[in-house]
Image: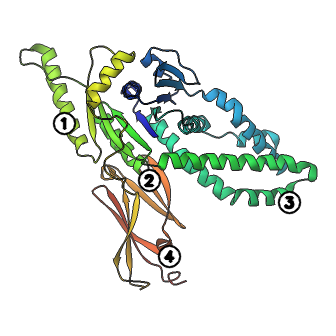
Amino acid sequence: MRVVLFTGKGGVGKTTLAAATAALLARSGRKVLVVSTDPAHSLGDAFEAELGGDPTELEPGLSAAHVDTRSLLDGAWARLQEHLGTLLAGAGVDELMADELTVLPGVEDLLALGEVRRLAESGLWEVVVVDCGPTAETLRLLGLPEALSTYIERLFPPHRRAVRGLISGLAAGREAQPAWDRAVNALEALAAELQGLRRLLADQDTTSIRLVLTPERVVAAETRRTLTALALHGLRVDGLVANRLVPEAPSSLRGPAGRWLRERYADQGAVLAELKALPVPLRVTEHTATEPTGLPALRELAHALYGSDDPAAPPDAPATPLLQVNRTAGTGTALDSAFELVLRLPGVAAGPVDLVRLDDDLAVTTGGTRRMIALPSVLRRCAVTGAYVAGDDLRVAFVPDPAVWLR
């Protein structure tokens, strides 16, 4: 199974390219599902078809759907809110405040991603193509499973034992126990769902992301930041797609139109040269005279984009681990040892980086996103002495802390 997610700044054509990719894959004989988590719900417009929450077969081998977050909110999440409200009310929290505390920002995004995972793991399709929302929403969406999973793990560690211990001290009597049990079971189910989502996203042999952009300097700058942010989350980008390239002006074209086209062509060429320097394959598509909608036009666009290549082929190069630890001095448990934590973050040199050591974690902020990275065990007994950027690597230096090194 392969899962390919398309995202990019709003208006760059990511929905059209996701639909085109799925249409071409289906013609190769594979069973393909393309699903949209974008609230704009423009996937149906690209196919010129009516789509709903349940997959609709557009032609043999090709199905499409829009994730219906409203029905998901009214279903499983509503029941979980009720169970969490019971837990808080039993702890003495006012009913109105309990209702407010169980409102989770971004839950629509989380439910949409959970539905994608359910469809992907159903075994009905060989390839699932996902039309994500604009870049900012996608970063929040892809970072939610790990962030919320970490939050729940720390709030209820381990879930059943800690929460049941709390329950036994707060419950008014045995008749309250079934309600508490349901609350605990709901929390455990949420934790399992989050862990499953994280596994799917972090499986770089199965899941990859394609960033769609138009060759403009502002959009390219955002793309570089997004590339860094996704790498920080341990997510793999297997390609960039520069959409809507203008053709080179013929020498016979004169006047304002000719000047505009030549200047535009030169400016786009300069942006493409910068993008080619990034460690991610780049594909390009030309600006079409008419908007490609409907299956024939979408397949024509996909042929121009991929040629004879397989749109769902996994990347040739093995995935690069997010981090590695190098010893730079000393041996064994010598106090004069030194270590370097290397974080592989493509594009990190283009923007500011902020680092904060928080107990056994390193909080890294770059590319407009922040992630708490658990330090390897040897570095937990060390102190940070400095950090610097070298190419696409963020390198953090550590030396043993004498107070805890040999304990």
Q: Nearer the viewer, residue 229 or 353?
A: 229
Q: Amino acid at mark 2?
A: Thr
Kindly indicate whether the residue at mark 3 contacts the one at mark 4 (C-beta within 8 angstroms).
no
Which residue is under mark 2?
A: 365
Check disc 3: other Cα within 10 Å, few if <14, some if 14-19, many if 20+.
few
Looking at the image, residue 54 lies above or below residue 387: above
Report how far apart the C-alphas of labels 4 and 3 lie in the structure.
Answer: 37 Å
Q: Amino acid at mark 1?
A: Ala
Check disc 2: other Cα within 10 Å, few if <14, some if 14-19, many if 20+.
some
Report how far apart the C-alphas of labels 1 and 2 lie in the structure.
Answer: 29 Å
Which marked residue is nearer to the observer: mark 4 or mark 2? 4
**Do we see residue 357 in this rendering?**
yes
Q: The residue tagged with tag 1: helix, strand or loop? A: helix
Which residue is under mark 3?
A: 169
* Circle nearer the N terminus (4, 3): 3
Could you tell me residue 206's position as x and y percent? 44, 45
Kindly indicate whether the residue at mark 1 contacts the one at mark 3 (C-beta within 8 angstroms).
no
Q: The residue tagged with tag 2: helix, strand or loop? A: strand
Which residue is under mark 4?
A: 381
Looking at the image, residue 163 lies above or below residue 126: below
Residue farthest along the front direction in this orientation: 29
Tell me which corner region of the image, top left, top right, bottom left or bottom right, holds residue 54.
Answer: top right
Could you tell me residue 127's position as x and y percent? 45, 35
Q: Please report the residue visible at 85 percent of the width from the left and 58 percent of the height from the top.
A: 168
